[in-house]
Image (tube, rainbow, N blue to C red):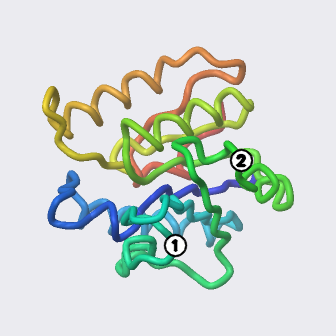
Amino acid sequence: MTTGLVIIDMQQGSFGPDARRHDVPGLVRRLNALAGRVRAAGGTVIFVQQDGPEGDPHHPSRPGWHLLAELEALPDDPVVRKTACDAFLGTDLEAVLSERGISELVITGCATDYCVDTTVHAALARRYRTIVPSDGHTTAERPHLSAARIIEHHNAIWRDFLAPAGPALVCPCADVLRQPPR
């Protein structure tokens, strides 16, 4: 089974002083380690970047569009550009996965309750074996719920999500690629 690690919206514009995210240094360390394991196992690391509209911090002409400098992106890593929460919608993600024979997705990044959640649902609906590292995504505090509770809630939902290929496997980053196939 060929694995694709999908790293969503880990862009400078999502991590400024006005957009505090939960455990960013730890998340970046875990994602870099996971990316190294995926590459060593013959998988592909795919970076997904939001193309915001003119004036948005994620507009391709703005510094916020670029990936966090601490991420270990390699020149051969595919980059998928999106304009919606769903990394599949109107993008070439499915073509990248097909070209590389990827049948298992590890979905990570920012923000848990928006782009990560939407992409997890879209992957499950497309029958991909889907793994979501419980400590591989982040979000900001919301007026109604802390970031830690949002992350905990979504991990629970993905574990029980009804989908044709079953729910997502939710486990820590350190256990990804160490889990037996379902």
Label 1, residues with CA under 10 Å away: few <14, some 14-19, many ≥20: some
Left or right side of 94 for 55: left
Amino acid at circle 2: Gly
Left or right side of 17 for 54: right
| Image spot of residue 26 (x, y percent) | 25, 62
Marks 1,2: beta carbons within 8 A: no
Kindly identify which numbered label has been placed on residue 60.
Answer: 1
For the C terminus, the quadrant is top right
Kindly identify which numbered label has been placed on residue 90.
Answer: 2
Q: Nearer the viewer, residue 126 or 50?
A: 50
Q: Residue shown at 71%/47% (left/top)?
A: 90
Q: Quick one: which residue is furthest to the bottom in this view?
A: 75
Q: Is residue 69 above or below residue 54?
A: below
| Image spot of residue 120 (x, y percent) | 55, 36
Q: Residue shown at 57%/52% (left/top)?
A: 83
Secondary structure of the residue carrying tag 2 is loop
Alpha-carbon distance for marks 1 and 2?
A: 17 Å
Q: Residue shown at 22%/46% (left/top)?
A: 140
Label 2, residues with CA under 10 Å away: few <14, some 14-19, many ≥20: few
Q: Residue shown at 68%/63% (left/top)?
A: 43
